[in-house]
Image: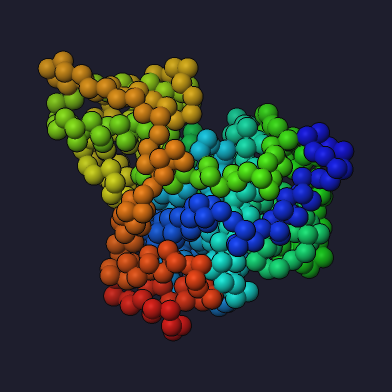
Amino acid sequence: MQPGLSGGRSAAQSLSDYALGVRFEQLPADVVRLAKDCLIDALGAAVYGHEVDAGQAVLRYVAGAAAGPCAIPGTATRVAPEVAAFAGGVLVHAAELDSLRQPGAGVHPGASLVPVALAAAQLGGASGRELLAALVAGIEVLFRIGAATKHSAEARGFHAPGLTGPFGAAIVAGKLAGVDARTLCQALGIAGSLGGGLLEFAKSGDGGLVKRLHLGRAAQAGIVAVQLAQAGFDGPSTVLEGRHGFLHAYCEASDAARLTDGLGTRYETSTLCLKRYACHIVAHTPVYAAQQMRAAHDIDARRIAAIRIEGAPRLAANHDIKLPANQVLAQYSVPVCVAAALLHDADDPATFGARLLQDEAIRALAQRVTLVATDATGLATVTRITLDDGTVYERAQTDFPGCPSTPFTPAQLRGKFMRMTKRLGTAADTLFKRLDRVEHEADLHWLDAMPAAPSDSFAGGERR
C-alpha cells in the first residue's frame, strides 16, 4: 500500500473510478457554473490567441495537417483530435489570459483541458452536459495532482503545467471517449511519460514562446495517452505516488495524500481562478492595486517618482525584470506590467501585448519600480506609489476579481470574453450566449462554424 492511500488501490485507480462516476445531474450548480466559466474563458482566450505570435506560429505549424473531425478553436479548420488539442492548448495560453488554481498549484485548466474537451466532444458526439461533466472530472483530478506537488516541481526547473496537464487531459479525453476504468488508469500511467517543459525560457533571455508550447503538448498528451491505452499500451498504475513516479521524480516536496483527499466529497473546482489581465498571475494583485489607485486619485503617471511593491519572496526573485528581452518575459515582469497598468487600460489584453516592449514610457516607468521580499504568502502584495511632490498612495491587495474569493460577476465574465473576441464582431455575442447555455446543447459540432475573422458570420448552430 502506498503512503497516504487506502484500500490497497493506487491513486490513479481511485482517480479513474471517480472520474468515470461524475454525472452532470449530480453536480452542484456552483460547480457547473465554474466549469462553464472555465470553458467560456478558455474559448475567448483561444480566439484572442490568433492575434499573438505563439498563436500565429502554431497555426502555421498545423496548416498542413491532414483533415479530421475536430475544429481548431477559433477556426473552421478541421483536423485530427490530437492536432486540434495541441493547437488549442497553445492558442488558449498564447496571450497569458488563461485560468489556473488559487492557491497556485502549477495547473492551467483552461489551456490543458478545454481544448481536449472540445476535440473529444466533437469526435464522439458528446452533449454539452457530458462536456461539462468531463471538465469537472478533469479539473478535480488535475487540481489534486497539482496540490500534491506542493508547487515544488519548478524548484527543479520544470514548468509545472506541462507536467500536470497530461493527467487532467487524459481524464477528460478518456471520459468523453467512454473508456472503462482500467483503460483510463492505463492512460494516466502513459500520461506520466508524456509530460514535460523547462523553465529556462524565464532565465535565458530568449526562447520565450516555448512556454506556450508546454500547454499545447499537455492537451495533446491527454488524447494520445487515451488513444495508446485503447490500442493496447499500458502504463504503471502507481505512476503518481510510486517510488519512481511523478511526485518523487519531479518534485522537491510532495504530499501523496492530497491526490485523493476529499475525492467525491469536496470539489476542488471551487478553487478555479480566472485571470483578469493578460499577464502572469503574480502581477495581478499589484496591477489591480495600481489600476484602482490610478482611478481613485487620478494619478498622472508622468508624476510618479517611485513605486514600491512588497510581496512573497518569489516576487522579487523571479519577476523583477526591468528590461525584458521578449514578450513572454515582459508579461512575467511585475515592474513592466504595473507600469503598463498606470499608463494604459489594464483590462485591454492589448495593453500587455507588443507595447510592453515598444512603449518607451512603460520602459522608463518600470525602472522606478522596486520589488521587496517580505514574509507575505500567495499573491498578497502592498503597492506604494510616491509622486514627485512627496504624495504617497498605498494599497494592500490579497486578491482580484476572478479569484475564488471574489469570482467574476456575469457582467465581468462577459466583458472579458467580449474584449478577447473583438475580432469576431457581432458574432462574439452570439457565441457567448450559446456557450453560456452549453448544457442545453445536444452536441458540439456547431463549434466548427466559429468564425475565424470579422468578415465571417457565425452559423447560429447550423454546420457549414
Q: Is residue 228 above or below residue 375?
A: below
Position of 250 with respect to 464 (left or right) is right
Report the side of 405 relative to 323 (left or right). right
| Residue 437 percent location from the top left of the image | 44, 67
How many marks overall?
0
Q: Quadrant of residue 132?
A: bottom right
Residue at 67% x, 29% y is: 252
Quarter of the image where one finds residue 406 = top left
Q: Nearer the viewer, residue 398 or 193?
A: 398
The N terminus: image quadrant: top right
Q: Residue at x 73, y 35 (%)?
A: 257
Across and down, in percent, residue 85 comes to 56, 63
Task: Say if 387 sits above or below 451 in the image.
Answer: above
**Visible in this render: residue 193?**
no
Q: Is residue 458 left or right of residue 27?
A: left
In this orientation, does residue 87 appear?
Answer: yes
Q: Of residues 11 and 25, which is closer to you in this image? A: 25
Q: Is residue 289 above or below residue 39?
A: above
